[in-house]
Amino acid sequence: LTLSRTPPASQPFQTYNIGDSDRPVFIQWSPDHGQPAYETIGPPKKFEGRTQHAIRAAYPTGSRGDVLAESIHQEGSQLLEIRRGLKTGNPDDYAFEGPGPHVFAIAVADSAEGAEHYTSGLIDLFFE
């Protein structure tokens, strides 16, 4: 993962405005390896109703399975807990070493075309 305020010389990269900033951030990455958190379902063998699901949930593996998350919606608020090892052993993952700051951002997307997505501002994480 590479974050930059100037466009990378090579592809692929995406441009984001993080938080309230009007200065774009260019993000370039290689996809994680392993099974994603879903799997595709082949065409149905028989009629099962008017709606046919194309994907179903699956347990991610490899570098895609480094992060565990749980969410709860309660009293109008959404709480998200994210867990990940300080060092995953995967060369494409950031290793949390030392007290910090460890700078990151959180993005929420629902994988729908034209849907609204959310990106936090930059977050400074410190360990005591």
Image (cartoon, grey):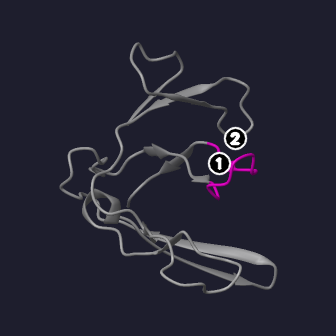
Locate the C terminus by quadrant: bottom left
Quadrant of the image occupied by residue 75: bottom right
Name the secondary structure under disc 2: loop
Q: Residue at x 28, y 57 (%)?
A: 63
Residue count near mark 2 (Cα–Cα under 10 Å), binned few <14, some 14–19, many ≥20: some
Where residue 104 appears, as percent x and y from the top left, is 49, 45
Q: Out of 42 and 37, give the one closest to the viewer.
A: 42
| Amino acid tagged 2 | Gly
Residue range highlighted in magenta: 109-121
Q: Are marks 2 and 1 in contact (CB under 8 Å)?
A: yes
Q: Out of 28 and 80, give the one closest to the viewer.
A: 28
Q: How many marks?
A: 2
Name the secondary structure under disc 1: loop
Q: CA distance from mark 2 to mark 1?
A: 5 Å
Q: Is residue 125 left or right of residue 16?
A: left
Where residue 1 appears, as percent x and y from the top left, is 37, 37
Residue 102 magenta-drawn? no
Q: Earlier in the sequence, mark 2 or mark 1?
A: 2
Where residue 21 appears, as percent x and y from the top left, is 71, 31
Residue 110 magenta-drawn? yes
Query: Is 13 above or below relative to 107?
Result: above
The kind of secondary structure the magenta stretch mainly shows is loop
Give the labeled residue for mark 2.
Answer: 19
| Amino acid tagged 1 | Ser
Where residue 103 appears, as percent x and y from the top left, is 47, 43
Residue 120 circle label: 1
Query: Is 126 above or below relative to 24?
Result: below
